[in-house]
Image: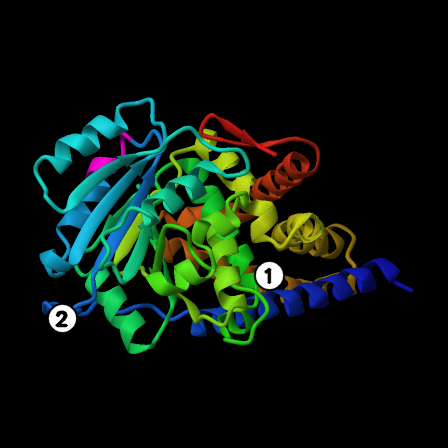
């Protein structure tokens, strides 16, 4: 009995089934992740009052471009305020904001007092900002400093939230990927989320969990205050997900959409920021230490199957002359072509060179190591971010 060839055929067929399941899964997830189309938005003086809150800590390289894009919004100027909350920056961020505030009446700067125990810096800054908005503010919009906003962003987002009676609208930005590390890791990471998180269930009003994108959260003020705002999730590392989860648990309507056409963000700049930035949140993003570990341990062999199984079949067919291994080549190559095609589509979506699609096993392997590091930090150490350590 040619057990070696039969094993290769079994592996190839299993790999083919898995590859096509992954593609079907990605397509289905995309269907329940609609994009927000740019619109003229609410341009009249009857538009609800929005205060954009930008928490910053050592963002001197980002904050000016972010604020310029927010201050150029096509939204009634009398109904828009921008509040930057400086979280003890040491790189001159506050001076940049103060200089811009002298030129723009809509822009204000708030400096935080020392961080209290039991809160992360970002939650503390967001909470203080929410307590300092104008009295007539109806919507709070939390925006990260690395976001660059299209002029139609706020009008389109507020219009959608009002029309659909949402309490929280989160927009996932178009990721601006420039360094090798960003281009290798982030597409694989986002595809992993598509494979592992059931967006259909998470988008449902009666779903148990939720997915949001931290760079842009538009929240109805009365809903935010009803659940206690960022003070209620002050110790959470992934405060965006924790806040959205509480809102959903209280019956408020939460929705995530693609904001590809309305905002972009460059969250990291290379290995030195990609690794700590992702390791900080991966445990929470993947549902806890156990599920994060399982995801990491499954990702590595699956990723390398794209090259390993066809190579194994080719060795059996050409090197040993096993006929069953030769038959196994067809499903193996079909599966690997499908997997590479999926990552080619991802590379095109992220506007990066297509040859990065061929490196996806390296991307998943590096991501898995980040997951292991994230679990280690959560269980045995402390999470470190921007000069602070959190238990």
Q: Residue at x 36, y 47 (%)?
A: 353
In this view of the protein, which residue sits in the foreground, 9 or 73? 73
Q: Is residue 226 one of those drawn in magenta? A: no
Whether 57 is drawn above or below 68: the answer is above
Report if residue 258 is visible in the image: no
Q: Position of residue 264 (x, y in %)?
A: 29, 51
In this view of the protein, which residue sits in the foreground, 223 or 334? 223
Q: At numbered mark 1, what does the secondary structure look like: helix, strand or loop?
A: helix
Highlighted range, magenta: 60-64
The answer to which image quadrant residue 68 occupies is top left
280 left or right of 254? Answer: right
- Most extreme residue toward the left is 103
Identify the residue under disc 1.
196
Whether 359 is drawn above or below 50: the answer is above
Q: Position of residue 159 (x, y in %)?
A: 24, 71
Q: Residue at x 29, y 46 (%)?
A: 132
């Amino acid at each position: 009995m040619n057990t070696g060839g039969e094993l290769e055929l079994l592996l190839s067929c299993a790999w083919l089934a898995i590859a096509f399941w992954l593609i079907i899964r990605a397509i289905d997830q995309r269907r329940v992740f609609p994009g927000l189309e740019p619109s003229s938005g609410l341009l009249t003086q009857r538009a609800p009052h929005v205060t954009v809150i930008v928490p910053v800590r050592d963002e001197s390289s980002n904050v000016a471009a972010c604020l310029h894009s927010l201050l150029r919004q096509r939204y009634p100027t009398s109904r828009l305020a921008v509040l930057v909350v400086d979280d003890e920056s040491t790189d001159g961020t506050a001076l940049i904001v103060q200089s811009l505030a002298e030129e723009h009446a809509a822009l204000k700067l708030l400096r935080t007092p020392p961080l209290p125990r039991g809160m992360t810096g970002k939650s503390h800054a967001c909470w203080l900002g929410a307590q300092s908005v104008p009295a007539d503010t109806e919507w709070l919009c939390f925006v990260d400093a690395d976001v660059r906003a299209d002029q139609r962003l706020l009008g389109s987002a507020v219009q959608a939230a009002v029309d659909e009676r949402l309490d929280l609208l989160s927009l996932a930005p178009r990721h601006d990927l420039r360094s090798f590390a960003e281009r290798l890791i982030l597409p694989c990471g986002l595809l992993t989320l598509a494979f592992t998180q059931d967006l259909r269930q998470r988008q449902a009003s009666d779903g148990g969990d939720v997915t949001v994108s931290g760079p842009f959260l538009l929240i109805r003020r009365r809903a935010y205050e009803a659940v206690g705002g960022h003070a209620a999730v002050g110790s959470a590392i992934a405060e965006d997900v924790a806040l959205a989860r509480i809102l959903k648990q209280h019956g408020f309507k939460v929705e995530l959409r693609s904001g590809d056409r309305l905002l972009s963000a460059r969250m990291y700049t290379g290995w030195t920021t990609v690794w700590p930035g992702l390791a900080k949140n991966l445990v929470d993003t993947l549902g806890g230490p156990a599920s994060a570990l399982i995801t990491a341990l499954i990702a590595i062999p699956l990723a390398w199957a794209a090259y390993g199984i066809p190579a194994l079949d080719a060795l059996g067919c050409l090197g040993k002359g096993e006929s069953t291994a030769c038959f196994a080549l067809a499903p193996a190559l079909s599966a690997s072509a499908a997997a590479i095609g999926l990552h080619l589509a991802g590379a095109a979506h992220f506007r990066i060179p297509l040859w990065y699609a061929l490196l996806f096993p390296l991307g998943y392997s590096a991501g898995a190591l980040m997951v292991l590091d994230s679990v280690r930090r959560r269980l045995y150490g402390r999470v470190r971010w921007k000069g602070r350590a959190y238990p």
